[in-house]
Image (cartoon, rainbow, N blue to C red):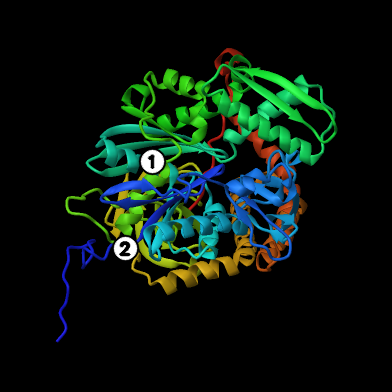
Amino acid sequence: MELLQIAEPGQSAAPHQHKLAVGIDLGTTNSLVATVRSGLSVVISDELGRPLLPSVVRYLQDDVPAKVGYEAKDAQALDPRNTISSVKRFMGRGLKDIAHRESMPYDFEDSAGMVRVRTVAGSKSPVEVSAEILKTLRERAEASLGGQLVGAVITVPAYFDDAQRQATKDAAKLAGLSVLRLLNEPTAAAIAYGLDNAAEGVYAVYDLGGGTFDISILNLSRGVFEVMSTGGDSALGGDDFDQRIFCWILEAAKLQPLSAEDAHVLLTCAREAKEYLTQHGVAPIRARLNSGEIVDLKLTTEVFTEITRTLVTKTIQPVKKALRDAGLTVDDVKGVVMVGGATRMPQIQRAVGEFFKQEPLNNLDPDKVVALGAAAQANLLAGNRAAGDEWLLLDVIPLSLGLETMGGLVERIIPRNSTIPVARAQEFTTFRDGQTAIAIHVVQGERELVSDCRSLARFELRGIPPMVAGAARIRVTFQVDADGLLSVSARDSTSGAEASVTVKPSYGLSDDEIANMLKDSLAHTKDDAQRRALKEAQVEAQRLIEAVRSALKNDADLLVAEQQSAIETAIAKLQAAMLGEERRDITLAMDAVEVATRDFAARRMDKSIRRAFAGKTVDEIGVISESEDNKHMGEHA
């Protein structure tokens, strides 16, 4: 007879069977792995007691395994072409997206839209390079914990787009890791501070890493972490400060164009000078270049502050926007959490302190705080919930949520992998003159056409005042609560009419169903884009036809028979083009209609002006001012 073990939800059935899970901060400059021991998050160090792993990989010839970390970093100056650092900046990116390529020693190539680096071991993608780093961290963790990992939470910048997030997941899979979740770095930092300091209130997380900058405004309350707004720059980080010092060295030393190897030497000197200035007022910069030139300079804190002033300002602008988006002021912020090694720079500390009118929080190591928070969530996701551990585990949406627009197209409102609870709103407008109702069709999926997505709910908004097409403003709000319940509401800004529906989205889709939907979206990306472009052209063509028909109905007397016939012929050709599958044919036919109606439009304008000014004196007419047209946000049938 077998016995069943019973446990509280989220807790291990056998307390002694602690599942091994880790949090990984895959950083631009350094990476870390952490776990939970005896209820506390701790960073796992290597055999020499070093917590950080430099995010550097060196490839060698003859199938020799790649060197990762300090050993690779030490060889950077000797073998820069085969030693890759700051690979996080390349994740999910094409060649045109890589800044400062000219100062990098790598031999880049563009393959299928994603940049690759040619090495002696072959062409390597950022996914493969990142996988080497993740594999080293996995091996470190398994050696320390004495067993195989059940999974890992890997952190990413909040501003990482889907391509960058997917590249990160692919790298983890290649490294033999099961990804429990991709967690935004600012949220991970907030988790670490919320648990370690029992913090509550509104906090700003200022995260300046080696290659990315994130700002998040979070509300912490009894273990619930609510992201109120985010902002940042995915191409701004400590590397840019190094680049400013590098340019200063070139100018101060009056150096000629450098070889790739010499450029790398000076970039290394620049990074060392930046770090030295954190604790000192003057940093010596000395280097002997392959060209025979000797560099011997001194960089002061004052000069460093001046040459990087614009970079510091670039971080403050997103902070202001994030506060505006959250509807808050500086006075509402209880504390500022500093994340990322680049926040150690004195000018950063000073600028953040002056802006928020308070000293930033630095009681957790800015290099470790993200990994510590990721470890806490990994521990929960693995099912190691401890007694009294009551903080809320936020879920994510596996597939995008959106609604149907004219032509059967999907307008995504909440993208997949968004952390819940979440709320997003967008404005739409009417398609036809005099339209008094709007039908709203809520769908789920990643494809461009409604027919390829999953239908969730339908409802109608009535009571819209009859206006010309495009004049109405209907705000549609999607809100997903912590339980995964979706509510969609629509409100007309003119009349105040409202309608809403509450649905239970199909978050219960099986892994296979989700995988198939995502696989379909990837397989049909090009076809979907072409079909969407065709549908959009058809919608615009129909809009043009209806506008011309309405004008002819009201002002046909302005045309002679031949002119009206020419317009009708152009419309007929446009309608025929709309039945085809070529967007170019529709565009050309629309251009022909606009040419045919040009004189007609001018006559209608003259008639309108004469009607408006009829019987009025100059004084009565007054000054006519132009007003900016309302921005068209979209349409809905």
Assign a secondary structure to mark 1: helix
Which residue corresponds to the image point at 62% horizontal and 54% vertical from the top-left?
A: 67
Q: What is the quadrant of the N terminus in the image?
A: bottom left
Q: Position of residue 221 (x, y in %)?
A: 24, 39
**Proximity of marks 1 and 2: CB atoms separated by less than 8 Å:** no
Give the camera-side residue of 600 and 54: 54
Q: Which mark is residue 210?
A: none
Q: Where is residue 542 in the image (x, y as percent from the top left)?
A: 60, 57
Q: Name the residue under label 2.
A: 19
Which residue corresponds to the image point at 73% horizontal and 61% vertical from the top-left?
A: 61
Residue 576 occupies quadrant: bottom right
* Crowdedness near tag 1: few (<14), some (14–19) or many (≥20) residues, C-alpha within 10 Å: many
Q: Does residue 26 appear left or right of residue 299 in this picture? A: left
Q: Does residue 610 appear left or right of residue 423 in this picture? A: right
Q: Where is residue 350 in the image (x, y as percent from the top left)?
A: 47, 19
Give the camera-side residue of 541 and 375: 375
Marks 1 and 2, Cα distance to the nearest angstrom? 23 Å
Which residue corresponds to the image point at 53% horizontal and 50% vertical from the top-left?
A: 161
Q: Position of residue 607 (x, y in %)?
A: 64, 34
Say which label, 1 or 2, has the lower sequence index: 2
The amino acid pointed to by label 2 is Lys
Residue sticking out furthest to the bottom: 1
Q: Does residue 194 appear left or right of residue 337 in this picture? A: left
Which residue corresponds to the image point at 16% horizontal and 77% vertical from the top-left?
A: 4
Instruction: Please name which of the two marks, 1 or 2, marks the residue nearer to the observer.
Output: 2
Residue 463 sits above or below residue 342 on the image: below
Assign a secondary structure to mark 2: loop
The amino acid pointed to by label 1 is Ala
Q: Name the residue under label 1.
A: 189
Q: Does residue 287 appear left or right of residue 293 in this picture? A: left
* Tally of numbered tags: 2
